[in-house]
Amino acid sequence: MSTPVLAPRREGLTGVVTGAGTGIGRACLEVLVDHGARVDAWDRSDEALADLAGRKDVAARTVDITDAAAVAAAAAAAQKQWDRIDFVVNCAGAFLVGPLAEVNVESVRSLFDVNVLGTTIVTQALLPALKSSKGAVVNVASSVALKPTASNAHYAASKAAVAHLTRCWALELGPDGVRVNSVAPGPTPTAIYRTAGMSAEQESMLLRERAATIPLRRVGDPIDTARWIARFALEDDWTTGVVLPVDGGMSLG
Ligand SMILES: NC(=O)c1ccc[n+]([C@@H]2O[C@H](COP(=O)([O-])OP(=O)(O)OC[C@H]3O[C@@H](n4cnc5c(N)ncnc54)[C@H](O)[C@@H]3O)[C@@H](O)[C@H]2O)c1
């Protein structure tokens, strides 16, 4: 028999997706379920998870990823419900815009709390389960983690930390058989801009300006990123420590 060219897709896997209420996390949940996975969907917003009630192959949990006790309880509940955890997608995240002269220090602290510490707290809580399943961690960075930006330095720095954690954890966890990869999406219309306090006009101007300079001349769709996340979560291949731009070429120049 010849060797299959495509990496084998692991069947019947179970994992956690944070930030699964909306945007890229929700698109990711749908792609994973479409490919036979069972998903424990975490978000801090009850409302965003409400429509998942009664779904087969999905359990929704209201969790703030910056709250270590709440995360530990959710991790225990997820393992009790599904028996195993094969992947975690660290998608919950926050955005912040503003120049250095104006940026509010408490906002920066809370940004790093969600994007960097939250990713750490969740991965740490699920680590024993991931080691036992020889599972996968998928982190969500950003194209601005790869290419500096003048308009949202702290967000970019928080995502550069996520990208570097990905590479460091890949080294650390490789010998345990745990793969750690990340995606670095370009600008994608989701709730994140409005949640960060931008007006509809500011958001659409920013996305229009970005689209004009992206080599593929369009902003992203959540599904663009979700597809790659699902591959890293489900495919059993030899890739670890990757920070994959999914940005229409934006981070190239
Ligand atoms: N939209 C973009 O342009 C873009 C670009 C690059 C990277 N990203 C990253 O993609 C990820 C998903 O963002 P999105 O664009 O889908 O935005 P989104 O606002 O639609 O989704 C983010 C989700 O995370 C949840 N969340 C935020 N803080 C949380 C916390 N402390 N605990 C639990 N849940 C929390 C929110 O409730 C929300 O449902 C984020 O990490 C973001 O930084 C987005």
Image (cartoon, helix red, strand yellow):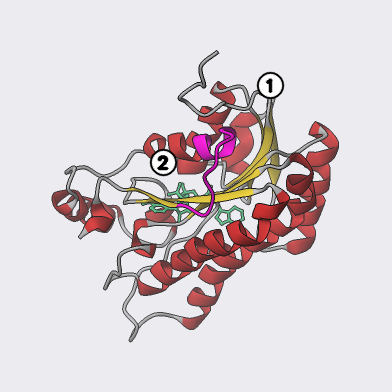
| Amino acid at dot 2 | Thr
> Dividing the image into 4 quarters, which one contains the N terminus?
top right
Crowd class of label 2 (few under 14; some 14 to 19; many from 20; radius 10 Å)? many
Percent across and percent down for residue 250 are: 24, 53
Q: Which residues are magenta?
A: 230-242
Question: Could you tell me what secondary structure mostly forms the magenta stretch?
Answer: loop
Q: How many marks?
A: 2
Residue 109 sits above or below residue 161 on the image: below
Look at the image and tell me whether residue 64 can be seen.
no
Which residue is nearer to you in this view: 73 or 168?
Answer: 168
Percent across and percent down for residue 32 are: 56, 30
Instruction: Tell me the tag on residue 200.
Output: none
Percent across and percent down for residue 102 are: 35, 83
> Dividing the image into 4 quarters, which one contains the C terminus?
bottom left
Look at the image and tell me whether residue 42 can be seen.
yes
**Which comes before the other along the chain, label 1 or label 2?**
1
Check if mark 1's residue and mark 2's residue have beta carbons within 8 Å.
Answer: no
Does the stretch in magenta take in 238?
A: yes
Q: Which residue is denoted by mark 1 in the rendering?
A: 56
Q: Is mark 2 within 8 Å of ligand 1?
A: yes
Percent across and percent down for residue 230 are: 52, 35
Instruction: Tell me the tag on residue 225.
Output: 2
Given this view, does label 1 or label 2 mark the residue nearer the observer?
A: 2
Image quarter of residue 48: top right
Which residue is nearer to you in this view: 2 or 212?
Answer: 2
User: At 40% across and 57% down in the image, what residue appears?
Assistant: 142
